[in-house]
Image (cartoon, coloured by chain):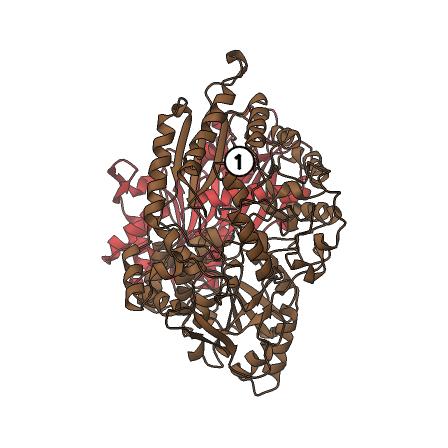
Chain colours: A brown, B red
Amino acid sequence: MRKLALSDEILMSVEKPARYIGGEMNVVMKDPTKMKVRFAMCFPDVYEVGMSHLGIQILYDMFNRREDTWCERVYSPWVDLDKVMREKKIPLFALESQDPIKNFDFLGITLQYEMCYTNVLQVLDLSGIPLNAKDRTDSDPIVVGGGPCSYNPEPIADFFDFFYMGEGETSYDEILYLYIAERESGHYNRREFLKKLANIQGMYVPQFYDVEYHEDGTIKSFKPNIDGIPTRIKKCVDTDLSHTVYPEKPLVPFLKTIQDRVVLEIQRGCIRGCRFCQAGMIYRPIRERSIEFLKDMAKKMLDSTGQDEITLSSLSSSDYSCLQELVYFLIDNYKHQYVNISLPSLRIDAFSLDVMNKVQDISKSSLTFAPEAGTQRMRNVINKGLTEEDILSGAMQAFRGGWNKVKLYFMLGLPTETEEDVKGIAQLAERIAEEYYTIPKQERNGKVNVGISTSFFIPKPFTPFQWTAMAPKSQFLENQRMLKETVREQLNQKSISYKWHDMETSELEGVFARGDRKLCNAILEAYRNGCIYDAWAEFFDHEKWIAAFNNNGITIEFYNLRERPKDEILPWEFIDVGVTKNFLWREYENARNAKVSPNCRRKCTGCGAASFGVGVCKEERLPDGSSVNYDGKDTGVNG
Amino acid sequence: MRVRVRFSKFGSMKFLGHLDVMRYFQKAIRRTGLEVAYSEGYHPHQIMSFAQPLSLAVTSDGEYFDVEFLKEYPTEEILEKLSKAMSIEFDVTKVTRRNDYIEQTKKTTCMSLISAAAYYIEVREQAGISMEHVKALGAMETCPVTKKTKTAEKTIDLKDGIRELFLPVDSLYVPTLELQYRRDDIKTPIMDQETLVNGLLHSARNPELTSLVIVLDAGSEDNISANLVCKALAELAQVEYNPYDFRIHRMELYGVEEDEVRPLWRVHL
């Protein structure tokens, strides 16, 4: 029988013990004595969140195809077990073998959002791995970070042996072969291994680079401190997404997870170029997976998991060239098997309404639009090529089709925002409600329900807004109040509801997003003082963070409220994501002039991603202005 | 076609709650590719009903659910395909056909058919509970215990809820299970041969430990949890009750058909 790392007494004393036992359908079990590499893959949040992440499933499958490697999973123990493990000094373990992480060769941590940083330290700490990479010995696992937040790894640079910049499918084989060779040489040395690793494309070993600062805290220089390693790190890109690894047998969790369904990534990257969106820049260029690949994968995954829902994942589904064929294929083949099809980030048009009609219960579902800004001027600033007419006509088509719930997503605090832009949000909601009531009473479906939701704009690295100042807290709160008031003054106020996100974590997220290495100590101190699960409102402790900032000379003003000049060396500038600084600056200027840029399929804007020589960059462009299909209307639809 | 499925849940899977087990089997059935019947309406679900939920930390060889298929399949095929769809520490052990002519009513759900349950209980060495205490339980006239329900606490006689009690004994070097107690009203033995052998195998694995095999009232009306027996034993031995001193394994569930108490897989209602 499988031995568990935790005793029955402990498992029975914590919430949801199934988080810690592994053994799910399609789990990979191997004989540890036959392995050359033990890889622990970590999502630093609770099981139900971590298990919902596609990237780990892809890498889990990829690593486990190797006969000499066993990849296992580890998640953050929930706060109840965290406490017990500290008290009883129980080391953190992997779900499959239940073996301590400390004995693994690698610990890979995916960094999906900034607020997980203290959980990274929790995982290291509970594992018994020194928190600072420089304190680790040859017997400690190599700690590697990846995922979107590694595009500015500097705030957590001290805690990682290396960061893998780019897409995991490309270079892990090379890394593992290097590691095995070093281990088998008989004189393995951590530092020597990392030195060799630093020469593989995309691998950033922070300890081999030094940062010098000016008196004002900005960066003076960023340079390697050893010879023979690159000064710039170029991200890895998978060149052919139709001939690559993809999990045919994804894990099926026992517990209900956030995303408890089959996830089919139909394409990677985005052609849209929304100026606030980091994903739209760092995953360039867009690469589609072939329709044959996707049909085959959908069947294999549904058969092997028994899941009753499949979601098509991408940044903008409507831009996938064979979307209709794929969706109708899924409906025709799986509808009678009661498979639900979910299509996030879909533009509202006749096709999407038809699909939704077939796959969803209209009376319960709502339509989601993401105009992001309330006025046309502001939408031009952020390059969200969606017009008010698009939104109104999309909503009207939906109303005629029987829907009466609409959700609208906006951001507050966008660059150049004025009072008019804030009020414009309420006015847009009002006009949608008014449109609804132009339908004769006998033809409409009761009252309309327009939900406004706002989040705070946080400037991110590798976007045209990476130089911009984030709005101060006071402005956010004032805008929130103004918006609330404007909604209330309107004729249809009873049909409009307004929900908003909390400000305090946004402020910190802003600091981490564009932070530098000086933050490492503050994060460490916050963790030592008990900060953990910061992404969870019930555990986020603003005061502890402010204290940790103060003690380490960190001010929110420096990171958030400062407009950076073009010639400032930004902390993440040593990373080459394809998209160039010149392009981003050009786009920043266009933003300030409220000038819209075309999407990748219409016209190349010379962003730099063509250097990868793949995807849309090699495709033939559409004749200028000929296609409404690829222009504009990128509203979203959600179930 | 209506079938009843018996399955085992063991090892680390004892930490899965009832709802998660239900979700697990819904997906497992989909993995078989067999055409399962769904309910009508906007949120169709598989026509499936589970027998008595198992407490966390208890393992079992006697778990059941009923499910309906749209087509006729040989039960061997269902068993084979379901077995292939299992993850570790789950086994499907029996698939039996249920009568088609009986209308699906509340009285014929898997849950409502249950009348008794057989358990193997093993006591940790350091718990201070010996075979003598188990024998004493068998010999007692009455054994008052407090039973907690959702709303109240009440005192019941545990002996009213015990139908049969067996103890492992070494006779002529062959370990056997010996009947220690049977409730007065029980005319025909309840424990079936297969379950008896199962209990024997369990106790023979750790012959030095105190262990017992017991048949308790079960079902929605007079359910006696195996924990109550453990508590009573602790009281008899005058030691503090610690649930982790006991390993509880459910072996079988019993239902009534034609006035006979049978393992649920032999009940065709």
Comparing A268 with A536, the one in front is: A268
Q: Which residue shows up at 62% across the image and 41% down it?
A: B30
Q: Quadrant of the C terminus of chain A?
A: top right
Is B74 situated left or right of A78 in this image?
A: right
Is A172 situated left or right of B231 in this image?
A: right
Give above or below for A515 relative to A454.
Answer: below
- Badge 1 crowding class, 10 Å Cα cut-off, few under 14, some 14 to 19, many 20 or more, is many
* Residue A337 x/y as whole percent: 65, 35
Comparing B136 with A345, the one in front is: A345
Disc 1 target residue: A369
Q: Which residue shows up at 45% across the image and 66% down it?
A: A93
Is A89 situated left or right of B7 in this image?
A: left
Chain to which mark 1 belongs: A
* Residue B61 x/y as whole percent: 50, 49
Q: Amino acid at mark 1?
A: Phe
* Residue B215 x/y as whole percent: 41, 45
In the image as oriented, which residue stretches furthest toward the front?
Answer: A593
* Residue B229 x/y as whole percent: 33, 49
Residue A89: image quadrant is bottom left
Give above or below for A310 relative to A70.
Answer: above
Q: Is residue B79 visible?
A: no
Comparing A63 with B103, the one in front is: A63
Q: Which residue shows up at 45% across the image and 34% down it?
A: A424
